Amino acid sequence: MEKAKFDLENMSVQDLTALRDAAEAKRLEKLDGARDAILAEAKEKLAQLGLPFEAAWSGRSAEAPARGSKKTSSGSQVAAKYRGPNGEEWSGRGRLPKWLHAMEAEGRKRDEFRI
C-alpha cells in the first residue's frame, strides 16, 4: 500500500482542515469496521456455546454510555446550593459560575448566596 505524502507546510488552512476531517472520517470508519468484526466473532463463539448474544451482552447496545460517563444511573440532578441575584442556581459542583465569580471579585462571600 502506497502512503500518501502531503506538503503540510504549503497547504492552506482550508486544505489542512479538509485533510483532518477526511482522516477523522476514515479513522471512525475503521473503528466501526473493527467493532463490527469483533461483535460478529463474539456472536459466532456464543452461538457455538449455545448462548444467545443478547444474554451475554446484558442489554447494552453500541449506543450505551461509555465507561466513565458522568450521567448517573437515575439521571437525577443535584439540588442547587447557591442562588444568584438574578435567580441563577449552582449546585456547588463543577466549574464556578461566572455570576458567583464576579460577586466574589467584588468582595462578597459565597455563603451570602447559599440557599
Image (tube, rainbow, N blue to C red):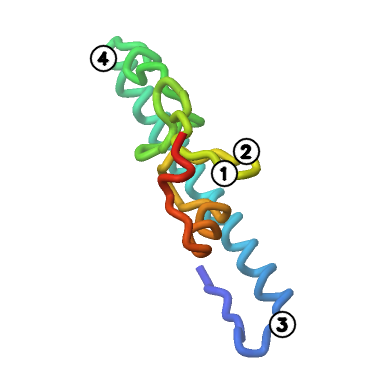
Residue 54 percent across, percent down from the top left: 40, 15
Tell me where residue 92 appears, x and y as whole percent. Answer: 42, 42
Secondary structure under the numbered disc 3 in the rendered image: loop
Closer to viewer: mark 1 or mark 3: 1
CA separation, marks 2 and 3? 47 Å
Residue in the image at 56% along x and 55% along y? 98
Task: Tell me if label 2 and label 3 are in contact, CB under 8 Å.
Answer: no
Determine whether label 2 and label 1 are within 8 Å by CB. Answer: yes
Q: Quadrant of residue 4?
A: bottom right
Query: Disc 3 marks which amino acid?
Result: Ser
From what the image shows, is residue 87 above or below residue 14?
A: above
Q: Secondary structure at mark 1?
A: loop
- Report, in whole angstroms, how far the alpha carbon at label 2 lies from the one at label 4: 60 Å
Callout 2: helix, strand or loop? loop
Task: Give the residue type that dot 4 points to.
Answer: Leu
Question: Residue at the spot x=57%, y=58% of the render?
Answer: 24
Vertical arrangement, residue 46 with respect to residue 83, above or below: above
Looking at the picture, does residue 69 appear above or below residue 77? below
* Contact check, label 3 and label 4, Cβ < 8 Å: no
**Mark with earlier residue (2, 4):** 4
